[in-house]
Amino acid sequence: MPETKQKTAAAALALLTDYAWHEITLPLLAKKSKQPLAQLEKLLDSKEEILPLINNQIDRLTLQATPEAEEGLSLTELLFDILMTRFEVMEPYRFGLTALADEARRTPEIAYPLYKAHHKSMSLYLTHAGDCPTGLAHNLHTALLVGTYYLVFIKWCRDTSPDLSRTMAGLNRALQTLERIGLKKWD
């Protein structure tokens, strides 16, 4: 089943290069993923269940592409590398992800699973960057990072620079603010 989910997520991401979320249907996803529609219908109770799968695929691609961390970097420096890699990984899917974010603002059925998936991602990235993986401090760091991610995501959606310089600058400023209010590795 994990291979089927990964295949489904990869197909959904590929569809987001050409289609807005409301245009993606299970039959279209079945065709793109080269899976029988009946198999997808067993895997997913609703189209919204694809959202965490898409996010998990982005996480996998992000962590695979994130450069090896240099010794002595702060938590915010490590998070900068991870999150910029995420924005670079998402770049080919910008059209669909931007449309999805627009729809999520109006549709709780989309917003809630996206929030849960992004919360899980930011927790994963914090742990990957060396934050304590449990406890109150980690939960607070995760909540702060989710909010930061959303603010920078909006910048990324509007960033037309070829090198994502506006996104980088926004992320850098946001992470510096988090560092000033106490986001650091938990010892």
Image (spheres, helix red, strand yellow):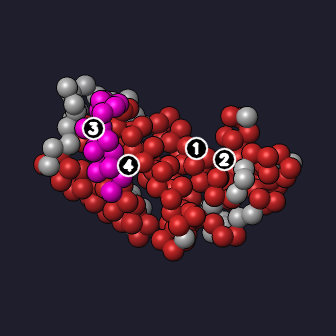
| Mark toward the start of the polypeptide (1 vs 4) | 1
Residue at (33, 45) in percent of width and height: 142
Asked whether the residues under the numbered discs 2 and 1 touch, taking CB atoms below 8 Å apart as contact, a structural biologist would say yes
Task: State yes or no: residue 93 in magenta.
Answer: no
Residue at (34, 31) in percent of width and height: 134
| Mark toward the start of the polypeptide (1 vs 3) | 1
Residue labelled with disc 4 = 84
What amino acid type is highlighted by mark number 1? Gln
Quadrant of residue 109 within the rendered picture = bottom right
The quadrant the N terminus occupies is top right
Residue labelled with disc 3 = 136
What amino acid type is highlighted by mark number 2? Ala
Which residues fall within the magenta stretch?
Answer: 130-147
Residue at (84, 52) in percent of width and height: 37
Q: Between residues 168 and 112, which one lies in front from this camera angle? A: 112
Residue at (39, 40) in percent of width and height: 123
Q: Secondary structure at mark 2?
A: helix
